[in-house]
Image: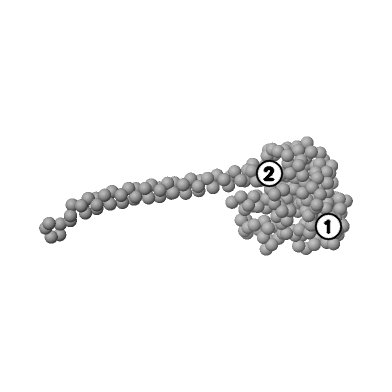
Amino acid sequence: MPPGEIPVGLQQKNSAGRKVLCVLLSVVGGLALLGGGGLVANTLSNANQVITNRSGYGPVMWRNERADKLFPKSLGGSKSEPQASATDPKHAAWNRVGIAQKTGCADGLSGDLADEVRKRGCKAVLRSTYVDPTGNFVATVALIVRAEGDDEDESLRRFFDSGKHGVKAFAVDGTIAADWKDQNRNGSGGVQETGLYLPYDIAVTAGSVDGRKSGRLPAEWHNSNGKWDATPWREAAKALADTVSLHLDQLLGDVTS
């Protein structure tokens, strides 16, 4: 056999080895493609899962999350930081002092609001009382859990716009809100959650920690309807309702992302 010539047997073995190697590389390449495809499919599945979780979790969030998550220690907002968390203590406009134990619809609501909610279907009413950092304002937030439906209710919208009281004040013993009661409610407001994931209405009633009642303004300051000086409390109640709504949206996003 000439020097440097590869024996025929070894040539055949090398040829067979190359075939095996090609097959193995093809298999590995195919698995890599499948793995990549699986990764993409899994990513898309996870994205879809977030949406599914939100639509499924939103309606039950009121009973699955702790009460102190639904009603955080502090609530507020910042015009200079619109994306800030509603629970950031740096922007706190309200501080929680207590959470009610009773969650029956009749336990938390009264009057026309109770009637409107009952007609629409009410599962529960969760309440928490907050005070502002100055210790002058007190407010009770009611998270109303609807039986079903996400469309805005015109009757309920009119009620919230009217400023009528409907949330029962929740006093908290041992705090500056210990004497908070229905007779001291000065202003109320609310907002309807109309998204697909949060079948809730939020109603708030506010008053003064010291029990001061709103009264009629001097003639030159009130309108032809004899407007009372309840505007500060009404605006505070509406702003707090909006903040709670923002918090619930953020909470749902956090727990389902």
Looking at the rendered structure, which numbered label has been put on residue 143? none
Q: Nearer the viewer, mark 2 or mark 1?
A: 2
* Frontmost residue, 78 versus 101: 101
Image quadrant where residue 135 sits: bottom right
Dot 1: few (<14), some (14–19), or many (≥20) neighbours within 10 Å? some
Under circle 2, the secondary element is helix
- Under mark 2, the amino acid is Pro
Tell me the distance, in whole angstroms, between the alpha carbons under discs 2 and 1. Answer: 28 Å
Looking at the rendered structure, which numbered label has been put on residue 172? 1
Q: Is residue 30 visible?
A: yes
Question: Residue under circle 2?
Answer: 59
Q: Earlier in the sequence, mark 2 or mark 1?
A: 2
Which residue lies at the image location 73% right of the left edge and 50% below the top edge? 241
Residue 223: where, in percent of width, then height?
A: 81, 47
Which residue lies at the image location 47% right of the left edge and 49% below the top edge? 39
For residue 125, side relative to residue 19 (left or right):
right
Under circle 1, the secondary element is loop
Residue 257: where, in percent of width, then height?
A: 59, 51
* Frontmost residue, 82 versus 178: 178
